[in-house]
Image: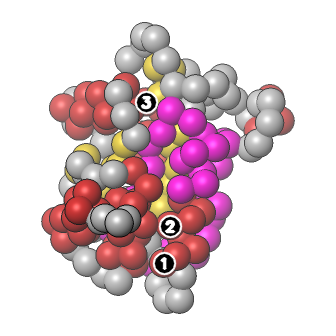
């Protein structure tokens, strides 16, 4: 998946990157076995990490679904990395399915390509939902033990959230 804004090389070690450590996709928080895993795919590692942290914080108070951020390129820039997505998906896969939420453009196309090529864990699904609100809804639902179809529909319902 080489191309503009898309990186397929391995992620460099944290000490090789400028700025924040984005090599760890999940924080290694104790996560529930058998829960749907969530992968947040963004062009920005900072955005993916921040949305992951917010969703975890709002879903706190019980078993926590595994959540991983897959943001930015291996070089630490803006873009999408197929390798980061694959690593994150395998990291959160507990056998109940993996819901992938993507921010826009090439992140969506990269996830679709990985799904079409059969490279993601069995039961992986791209969820059509707003990135931030959908991520929070997906993490809350998955942490409550919802199956993948319910996690996906709960995240998609976030399109209807009105702020006025």
Real-space CA distance between mark 1 and mark 2, rounded to the nearest whole angstrom:
6 Å
Does the magenta run of residues contain 75?
A: no
Q: How is the image coloured?
A: secondary structure
The percent coordinates of residue 120 (x first, y second) are 31, 42
- Please provide the residue range marked out in magenta: 22-51
Q: Decide which of 17, 104 is in the foreground and name it.
A: 104
Q: What residue sits 24% from the left and 69% below the top?
A: 154
The residue at which mark 3 appears reads as 82
The quarter holding residue 147 reads bottom left
Please name the residue shown 32% across and 75% down the image.
Answer: 141
Q: Nearer the viewer, mark 3 or mark 1?
A: 1
**Neighbourhood count class around disc 2 (C-alpha, 10 Å): few under 14, some 14–19, many 20 upward:** many
Mark 3 / mark 2, whichever is N-terminal: 2
Question: How crowded is the residue under tag 3: few (<14 C-alpha within 10 Å), some, or many (20+)?
Answer: many
Q: Position of residue 119 (x, y in %)?
A: 29, 36
Residue at 46%, 20% (x, y): give it: 6
Label 3 vs label 2, nearer the camera: 2
Choose top left, top right, bottom left or bottom right for residue 16.
top right
Residue beneath the point at 31% across and 34% down: 108
**Distance Cα–Cα, label 3 vs label 1:** 27 Å
Q: x, y (%) of residue 68? A: 50, 55
Tell me the residue that label 1 is attached to. Answer: 59
- Of residues 111 and 8, the one nearer the viewer is 111
Q: Secondary structure at mark 1?
A: helix
Look at the picture and state if 116 lies above or below 39: above
Quadrant placement of the C terminus: bottom left
Marks 1,2: beta carbons within 8 A: yes
Q: Secondary structure at mark 2?
A: helix
């Amino acid at each position: 998946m080489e191309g503009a804004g898309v990186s397929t090389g391995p992620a460099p070690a944290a000490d090789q990157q400028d700025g924040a450590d984005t090599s760890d996709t999940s924080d290694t928080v104790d996560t529930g076995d058998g829960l749907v895993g969530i992968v947040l795919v963004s062009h920005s590692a900072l955005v993916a990490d921040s949305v992951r942290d917010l969703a975890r914080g709002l879903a706190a108070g019980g078993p926590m679904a595994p959540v991983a951020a897959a943001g930015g390129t291996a070089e630490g820039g803006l873009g999408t990395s197929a390798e980061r997505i694959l690593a994150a998906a395998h990291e959160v896969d507990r056998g109940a399915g993996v819901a992938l939420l993507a921010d826009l453009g090439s992140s969506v196309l990269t996830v679709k390509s990985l799904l079409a090529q059969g490279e993601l864990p069995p039961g992986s699904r791209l969820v059509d939902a707003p990135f931030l609100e959908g991520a929070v809804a997906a993490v809350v639902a998955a942490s409550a033990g919802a199956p993948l179809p319910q996690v996906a529909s709960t995240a998609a319902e976030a399109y209807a959230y009105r702020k006025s």
